[in-house]
Amino acid sequence: MVEYAKPVPVADHVTREFWNGAGRHELLIQRCRECRAYQFIAQSCCRGCLSENIGWVAASGKGKVYSYTIIHRPPTQKFAADTPYTVALVELEEGVRMMSNIVEIEPQEVRVGMAVEVVFDDVGPAIALPKFRPA
Ligand SMILES: [Zn+2]
């Protein structure tokens, strides 16, 4: 593997399960054990009912492009070789929205409402970034 020069996620006590799952190529989201609501991003309590009784479940990995933008000017030189690339808000089947990249498609071909599925970009030992490709 070529050394990955871009920033990698740093897990904390709230996000550790998510990043451990991603490292195993599992897309995990939180689900409240009280009101059954799904949530992403990870939080220490439910945004719906404020319960701290929250667990993790495997998401289907399937969703739709809710919105997107095409990045032409890299935020740092480490992203320069990637431009143009797509940053999207993907709405999963479970209803939560996740910011990520749309890959395996030219940016100008991406459309709102397009069906996508998760793929994992391995960027280091047990570190993988969930991204989405056309389904
Ligand atoms: Zn709840």
Image (tube, rainbow, N blue to C red):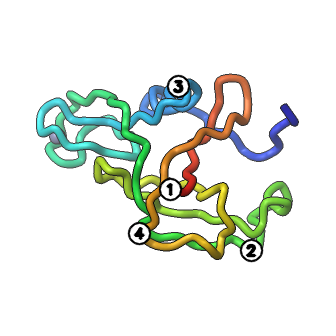
Sequence-earlier tag: 2 or 4: 2
Horizontal side of residue 57 vs 76, given as left or right:
left
Mark 2 secondary-structure assignment: loop
Local packing at callout 2 (Cα closer than 10 Å; few below 14, some 14-19, many 20+) is few
Local packing at callout 3 (Cα closer than 10 Å; few below 14, some 14-19, many 20+) is some
Label 2, label 3: how far apart the Cα atoms are? 31 Å
Amino acid residing under circle 1: Met
Sequence-earlier tag: 4 or 3: 3
Q: Name the disc covering residue 72, or none.
A: 2
Relative image position of residue 91 (x, y in whole percent): 38, 57
Sequence-earlier tag: 2 or 1: 2
The residue wearing badge 1 is 99
Label 4, label 1: how far apart the Cα atoms are? 15 Å
Label 1, label 3: how far apart the Cα atoms are? 18 Å
Amino acid residing under circle 2: His
Local packing at callout 4 (Cα closer than 10 Å; few below 14, some 14-19, many 20+) is few
